Amino acid sequence: MVYRFADFELNTTERRLARAGEFISLRAKVFDTLCVLVEGHGRLLRKDELIQKLWPDSVVEENNLDHNISKLRRALGEDGTKKFIETVPRQGYRFVAEVTAPVETDTQTKPDQEHAVVPAPPLISQEVRFFTAADGARIAYSVAGKGPVLVKAANWLNHLEFELKSPIWRHWLPILTANNTLVRYDERGNGLSSWNIHDFSFEAWVRDFEQLIDELELEKFSLLGISQGAAVAVSYAAKHPERVDKLILYGSFARGWMNRPIAGEIERRNALLTLVRLGWGKDNPAFRQMWTTLFMPDGLAEHQNWFNELQRVTTSPENAVQLLDAGGRIDVVDLLPKVQSPALVMHCSGDEAVPITEGRLVASRIPGSQFVELPSRNHLVIHTEPAWPIFVRELSQFMGWRL
C-alpha cells in the first residue's frame, strides 16, 4: 500500500519512506509507528492501542512509544508551522496531515493503474457534544454542516471520530452535510458514549433519541435510519409525526433476527453471539473477517480493513453481545402503518446482513413509501460500485437537493 502526505510517499509493502523522491532511513519500530499512524489518519490512537499494535508480544513502557514519536517528528521535519502528529494529552496521538491512498479496483488492475492516487474527500468539520441520559449514561453526539436539520439514528457500531475518515463513511458524510445540518450520535455502549451501562434495551435507544431531539430543541427535521437505526427512526416517526418532515430508511428492518421466519436463523445468530463473547476485541483477524465478510462481501481491501478495526475499537465483547441481543428482539412492525411522513426505503439486493425481504416488508407497511432496490451485496454501499450513484440520485430527488 502506498500513502502520500505533503511531499512524502510511504510504501508500507516495500517498507520505504521517501520525501520528494529521496529515501529516508528509519529504524524498524519507528517505521512501524509511522505506518500505524498513517493508516489510522484522522483518528485518535490511544497509547495502549498503539503499544499493543507495535509490541504485541512484549511488555514495554510508554516512553518507548514516546521515543518513537519524537524520532518521527524529527524525520518528518515538524516545526512551528508544519505539523503531522498531534498529541492528545494523557490519551494518545493523531496523524493530522491529509493522506491520499491508491485507487483499488479489482484483481485485474492494469500495471499502469496500480499507483493511481485520488485525494480523500475533505474531512467534515464537526462539533462533538454530550448529554446525560435518564439513567446517567453519557451520550456523545456531533453536529456538522449547514441547512435544514437531518438527524441520523445510530446504527450498530458507531464512532463519531473514527468514522470521519473511514473509507466506508467518508463518501456518505459529505453528501449528507452538503445541504443539511447533520446530527449523528454514538449509541449507548459504544463509540464515545458511555460503555459502563446496564440498560441496552431498544426502549432505552428510543428514549436516548427522544432526549437528543429535546436537547437540540428541534421542532421539525428529516430523519435517517440505517440498519437497526431504522427501527428507532420508525418508532420516533410513528410517535411524533408532527416533528418528522421526511424519513429515509436504508438497509432497514422492523423485526430483529429473533422475530424473522427464516429457518435456522436463531441458531446461526446464537452461534455468532458465542463467537463474539470469545473473540471480540482480540487481535484475531480471522474472527473479525467473518463479520466483515457478512457486512461487506464486495468491499475493497481498505473497506474490509477498516471494518475489521471498527469492531475492535468501538465496543467491548460484553457490550457487543448485549447490543446484538437487543437488536435481535426488535419488533416495530405494528408501528409502520402509523408513519405519516413521506418515506424513502432503500435496500441492497444481495444484502446478507439484513435480507432485502426485510426492507420490502418495511416499505409495504408504510403508507405511500417509495422503495428502491440497489444492485449491491454490501450492507453499506461504497463509492466504487454502480449502486452508489443510484443511491445519491434517489436520495437527492427525495430530499430536493442540488448536488
Image: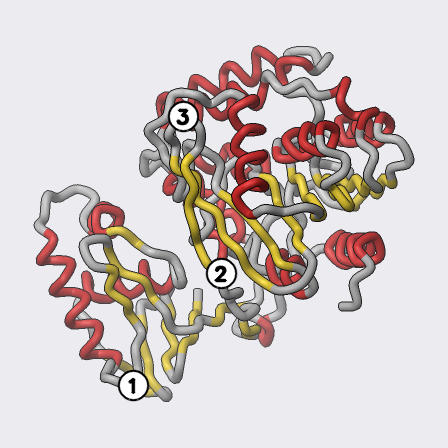
Q: Amino acid at mark 1?
A: Thr
Q: Residues within 10 Å of mark 2 (few under 14, many from 20)?
A: some
Placement of 371 over or under 336, stated as above or below: below
Mark 3 vs mark 1: give the one in front. Answer: 3
Residue 16 is marked as none
Res. 213 image quadrant: top right
In space, the residues marked 2 and 1 are separated at their CA atoms by 24 Å
In space, the residues marked 2 and 3 are separated at their CA atoms by 27 Å
Identify the residue position indicated by label 2 in the image.
126
SS category of the residue bearing label 2:
strand
Identify the residue position indicated by label 1 in the image.
81
SS category of the residue bearing label 1:
loop
Mark 2 vs mark 1: give the one in front. Answer: 2
Q: Residues within 10 Å of mark 1 (few under 14, many from 20)?
A: few
Query: Could one spot residue 287 in this view of the protein?
Result: no
Quarter containing the C terminus:
bottom right
Q: Amino acid at mark 2?
A: Gln
Q: In this view of the protein, which residue sits in the foreground, 232 or 317?
A: 232
SS category of the residue bearing label 3:
loop
Residue 243 picture location, percent across and down = 72, 41
Assess whether mark 1 and mark 2 are in contact (beta carbons under 8 angstroms): no
Residue 135 is marked as 3
Q: In this view of the protein, which residue sits in the foreground, 371 or 140?
A: 140
Residue 336 picture location, percent across and down = 79, 25
Between disc 2 and disc 3, whose residue precedes?
2
Between disc 3 and disc 1, whose residue precedes?
1
Q: Is residue 204 left or right of residue 97?
A: right
Mark 2 vs mark 3: give the one in front. Answer: 3
Q: In this view of the protein, which residue sits in the foreground, 233 or 104?
A: 233
Q: Residue at x 10, y 58 (%)?
A: 64
